[in-house]
Amino acid sequence: MTEQTGLAETRHDGGGTKSDGAVVRDALGVGVAVGLSGFAFGVTSAGSGLSLPQTCALSLLVFTGASQFALVGALAAGGNPFTAAAGAFFLGVRNAFYGLRLSQVLALPRAVRPFAAQWVIDETTAVALAHPTRRAARIGFTVTGLSLYVLWNLTTLLGALGADAIGDTDAWGLDAAGPAVFLALLAPMLKTAGERAVAGVAVVLGLGLLPVLPAGVPVLVAATAAPIVLWAQGRRRRAGGPRMDRRRGDGRPEVGQDEAARGQGVDVGGHGPQGEGGRRDDGQGEHR
């Protein structure tokens, strides 16, 4: 355990370690930039019919922007509250997987973990995982979480209070602020073809079913993009099958060809038919 802890303390320090001041500065930049979008949530939530206490409670207790925007967006479109809550829940499930990774990276004391769990979101995870040492990851996570939580809730309150003065929120397009921030964080993470395929299928399902299904349901259906892509990839691999006619880079048959050749009495070294033990068995040799 001591050896594992020591390794975790340094992690993958490849010479890119920043000073504590630089880590704090970067974390504050993320916290302030994203925290300001809480104003758009406050306005959108109030415009969807939620009261001021309900709007503020969502930011205080839920504190995950994509889920909050999904919930109020579905309610504003006239969706069923249970369907809207289910869509928000499935979007928030990703934070549980973030927590599994961060628990190893941060290694926080048990007494602190329940409070830190409230700050496990896209932004804090991205900042924490961007640093090579545990100390930097902890500082980045704490500063990002604290600044974002305070500013998000403050701007939510201001947005909800100023919703009447703004008027029609659809005319301002404020409801698109949350999804835009989420996409900006997600896009750099789509590095493999499979990940991009999942994102593309999810977009097609979500947008394609939006006109024909009740509000909130397209989000649930879009969650099936991952198993659909995995199924398609598995089927393609099975259809390809093992290729027995391919050769290695050194000119020798791949593993599996040798056995097939020997079963037919062929010398895989290219010297013609062979019998048992490597002796020729073409009718001219003798068996001992």
Image (spheres, rainbow, N blue to C red):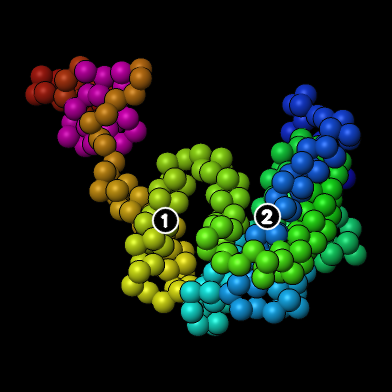
Q: Is residue 24 visible?
A: yes
In the image: residue 279, left or right of residue 202: left
- Spatial CA distance of label 2 from label 1 is 23 Å
Q: Which residue is mark 1?
A: 203
- Which x, y percent locates residue 189? 56, 43
Q: Which type of secondary structure does the marked residue at label 2 adopt?
A: loop
- Which x, y percent locates residue 184? 58, 45
Give, as a single range, the part of the protein colored magenta: 251-270
Residue 246 within the segment the image draws in magenta = no
Above or below — where is 147 with respect to 280? below
Classified by dominant secondary structure, the portion drawn in magenta counts as loop
Displayed quadrant of residue 265: top left
- Which x, y percent locates residue 69? 60, 65
Above or below — where is 85 with respect to 233? below
Q: Earlier in the sequence, mark 2 or mark 1?
A: 2
In the image: residue 47, left or right of residue 244: right
Tell me the amino acid under the disc marked 2. Answer: Ser
Q: Is residue 101 visible?
A: no
Q: Are marks 2 and 1 in contact (CB under 8 Å)?
A: no
Tell me the amino acid under the disc marked 1. Answer: Val
Q: Which residue is mark 2?
A: 37
> Most extreme residue toward the left, as rendered?
283
Residue ID at (81%, 43%): 28
Residue 263 within the segment the image draws in magenta = yes
